[in-house]
Amino acid sequence: MVKTGDGEPRVGRTKTVPTIKDEANDFLRQLRQAEVIKSDHQLACRSAEVVREIDTNTVEVQPSTSRNTAVKTAGPWFQSYEELQHGVRLAWLHAPKCIMRSEYQSLRLFDFRHVESSIEMGKVLLEGLVESFNHGDIAPAVYVFPPRQPGTRGPMIWNGQLLSFAGYPQEDGSVLGDPANVKLTQAIIELGWQPPEFRSRWDLLPIVTMAEGDEPAIFEVPQEHFPLVCIEHPKYSLPFQKLGLKWVPAPALSRLGFDIGGVEYTATPFIGWFMDAEIAVRDLADSFRYNALPDVIRALGWLDSSQSLEALPEHERLLLLSRAQAELNFAVYHSFRQAGVRMTDSMSASAIFSQFDDEYSSQHGYRLPSNPYWLAPPQGSIIPLWHRGGAPNYNPSPLICKHVQDPVNAWRRENRCPFAIGFAKDSGYASSGDSASESDVLESGPAIHIAYCSTATTAKKLATKLHDSLADAVHATCPTERSVKSVVCLNDVPIQDLRAQDTLLIIASSAHEGSVPLNGARFLASVRAGSASIRAQFSVFGNGDTTYADTYNGAAQSIVAALTRHGAQPLETKLFAADTAIQNPPWRALEEWLCQIKQDLELEEYDSDSSGDLSSSSDDVQTDSFSTARVVSKVGNDPTGLQQVTISVKELSHEPLSHLKLHVPNEGNAVRNALRALGLKGGEIVSRFQKSTAFAFLTNFADFDRPFKHISWASPLELGESERQLLTSLPWPKAVKILRKEQRLACNLEGIIAALPTSVPRTYSIASSQDLMSRRNRTNHLDLVIQPRVGGKASEFFRKAKFGQQLVVRISSSGTEWLTGSRGKPVICFATGSGLAPIRSFLQHRLHEHIDGKTRSDNVTLLLGYHGKDAEMIARAVQPFLSAGIVDTLLMTPSNAEKARVQDKLLDERVRQAVGNKIRFEGASVLVCAGVEAAEDFAGNLSAIVGRDVREALGQRYMQEVFEPAV
């Protein structure tokens, strides 16, 4: 039987008795043709038997689509195992969207028609899945549960795929996991499922089974039986490891039903194997799913961090996206083969189906039903099947189809639960009531409307960039006073809602001969025909091309003229004329226009410290907060290698992970010369600086390399313009020498000192634990680890410093909260170069606690990157912790020609597994101290391991210090 003209077939609709009989007899004839029924006599007997059973099962029901008329229908007639098996195979053969139908004869039937409870459904389904998956050697199978009875929905399964990932909405509107499963995830959570405490983008959703007349049951998928396939690439091994992509090992469709001989099976999940493009070109690549292609492009180095993929011309974007798609597709197929999981490639699947379809056509005189949109692999015309097109649109029975009801909504109706699936308040999604009130609040302030019109895509891309930039500016300057509306095409601008305080920003490309494109023409006509004036202010960005001089920015000019004529108020920049002949897309012009818009709308950000009373700026140094310290020892012979400096800080105390701020003292000769230039002896008290002496202030806090901050102290002097210029441009020790002695004496000492520039204190992470040092009778000592820089003032000081050399220091505490949270828990430490300092401080603290027996301490993973010349110092630094068993994993990598980095050792399978378990299941904290690039790379690798942004996930458990060399 062939069904046409009724739209997409569905199970769950009420059928009349004659229809059921016709479909039953048609199916029996197909069984006879296939020799399942051996003779015409048997066919006649079986037909009569089925008709009697249908008559016996006849009942009247009220269809959901009809309020008044009852319909005579019939319950399902019983099909033998052989009949049902042939039926499900024929249904697969007839599936117009499936490319793997050549395998239909191998489809195995699991007959679960005897199962009547939700719990039993889940139990037998999981057992059947494990058997069919067979460690990756997949045998296609279908699991058939009881058929639908008249007037019921039948048994159902909530999941669209039995093996799929959860999708969790985030506060910023993004989704952690699979966006396709956000509603299903929330529904299963509401049903009682508790997601993992550490959520990731690769959390397997449980299976929810729902028998007729029974409550839904939740079953966790045993991942040991269905291990996820990590996506790797044989040529780009490290970049793909850093991406951390994965996928489920098999497709298992579970919301489809079978209509066989008039009998509707509403719960018939099916397992098969993937074709490469299903995952690589759709699931992972679609922008509304995992959107992996931009990440692949960056990982492979085709686009650096300073470039935006969206900013590229369309033909360049297409090139990069196509290359990334091809490499990802290759990686997916390679990974499944390496994992021993069955998969077919697009080329082979296309060839196999084409041959099978040709053979079917030769045998029957017509081709199989084929939906070309679904059937042809998404790579397009390079796959031969793309050129075959589709067969006539017909639906031979038996067939596979969707259920007319959504299982979640069906459950909600039956239990009178709300239909709309909401989001938890902390997810960033509000209920309808909340969103309405929020809209009312925003409506009270000025709104910025952004619109575009174009025949292509450039104007929309420019509008999106404009929206994002203005949204950031509004958030930074006046988030509660102004709102930025979503980007719309010009025709969708709500003209009647525009208020005087609102702003309309339009990006307009021109159509033929300078006309307004179709997606803006209705707006222009409405403005021209409107009886009421438009009160909003506006500005238009003309996305034009001077190559077409006669029609250059014709659309933009028409829009400006119409808005002006009907009362809209132009901003200072009424029309900004961009030229794509200079740059296409015109990103630089957009930035220039954006700057002007920000000025017009007063969205410029100002540095609160950029202005103020110069005379008060000398108070930025609180000299009494610094204490005197002395250099005790130095370790490190290489002048360019790491040095360990020990300093005596007397009575100062400090916590682990604290910092030492120090002012590099000025050389004695320079200080004495400065005192003479100022006419001072050095013992004078400078009350402005906590009664410090002039000598102490000049030695410890004055910056000898910069000019006076101001010269208001010289106002009593009659100075010429050239003298004033010298005083404000030369380093102050030189500038003061241009004054005559009597001029210096005429000046107020406090005023001169207040105008002196103060040095910026250098900050170092303390590399020791005071508790451990006190065990060694060195309570007042602390260690620093310093990376010298040629010509650096701090580096020169420590290079020349002798025993007892004096300096002033201050200790600032940090990391106390992180330290408390990490007590007794695993810690992952990463450092490069002098970033060893805070790691050493923490490990000494752990060693102290280990000696006291206060906490378990054998669970630190330590990664260190360093220069080869520092190997001896690094080895000496970590040895005590290895000997004490504090560190359970040590990964070290010196600098090397191959540019191998220690953070990439995280991606080794053994390390990856151990570190991932520590974070996900053991509550590990992370401590990082490295340069910007290394710290970002480390965080990226950890994120790939745990399946989400690790810093966002761990919050306060992730402590990072990104250092710049002290000079």
Image (cartoon, grey):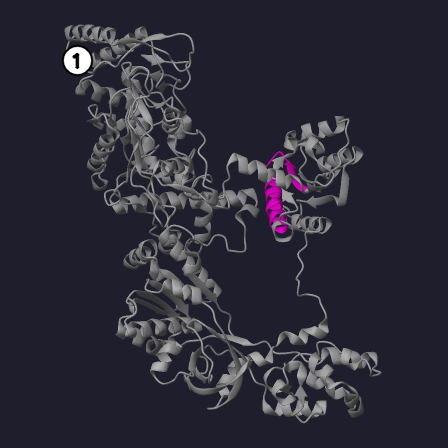
- Of the 4 image quadrants, the one containing the N terminus is top left
Q: Report x, y in % for residue 898.
A: 38, 65
Please report the residue visible at 68 percent of the width from the left and 54 percent of the height from the top: 604
Mark 1 surroundings within 10 Å by alpha-carbon count, few (fewer than 14), some (14 through 19), many (20 or more): some
Q: Is residue 191 visible?
A: yes
**Compared to 127, does 264 lie above or below?**
above
Please name the residue that numbered disc 1 is placed on.
37
Residue 454 in the magenta stretch? The answer is yes
Quadrant assignment, res 67: top left
**Compared to 3, does 635 lie above or below?**
below
Q: Is residue 833 visible?
A: no
Please report the residue visible at 33 percent of the width from the left and 71 percent of the height from the top: 846
**Range of residues picked out in magenta:** 447-474
Looking at the picture, which amino acid does disc 1 mark?
A: Ile
Q: Report x, y in % for residue 376.
A: 39, 30
Quick one: 650 or 678, which is closer to the camera? 650
Residue 458 in the magenta stretch? The answer is yes
Please report the residue visible at 79 percent of the width from the left and 79 percent of the height from the top: 724
**Furthest-bottom residue in view?**
681
- Of the 4 image quadrants, the one containing the C terminus is bottom right
Q: Report x, y in % for residue 248.
A: 31, 41
Helix, strand or loop status at disc 1: loop
Q: Horizontal placement of 59 versus 794: left or right?
A: left
